Image (cartoon, grey):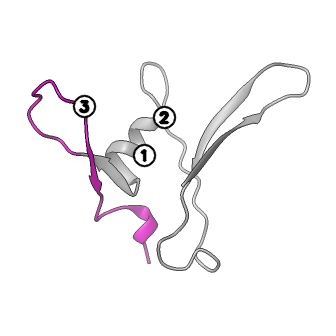
Amino acid sequence: MGFRYIGVDEKEDVQLFYYFVESERNPRDDPLMLWLTGGPTCSGLSGLAFEIGPMKFNMVEYNGSLPTFVINPYSWTKAR
């Protein structure tokens, strides 16, 4: 998994942030998917952490500790 900022316009100081997650099967031959999510009051990170990413938040009752991640068996990185 990798991440970085990419410039939008040479004349403006505007950048987009993205994560790149390779296929777990065959990254060279599997299709590349662009997942755009987010919007007003909704982080684009939510789709990666709660929906399609290779890892997801371990949803347990809050006990004051930091959140943990678990492997997502339904990640789109496993798609055929």
Residue under pointer 3: 66
Badge 2 amino acid: Gly
- Foreground of the two, 29 or 69: 69
The kind of secondary structure element at disc 2 is loop
Residue under pointer 2: 44
Badge 1 amino acid: Leu
Q: Where does residue 33 sit, x and y in percent of width and height?
A: 57, 60
Badge 3 amino acid: Leu
Residues marked 1 and 3 touching at CB (< 8 Å)? no
Q: Which residues are magenta?
A: 58-80
Residue 66 left/right relative to 39? left
Chain-order first, disc 3 or disc 2:
2
Residue under pointer 1: 48
Magenta run includes residue 8: no
Q: Residue furthest right?
A: 11
Residues marked 3 and 2 touching at CB (< 8 Å)? no
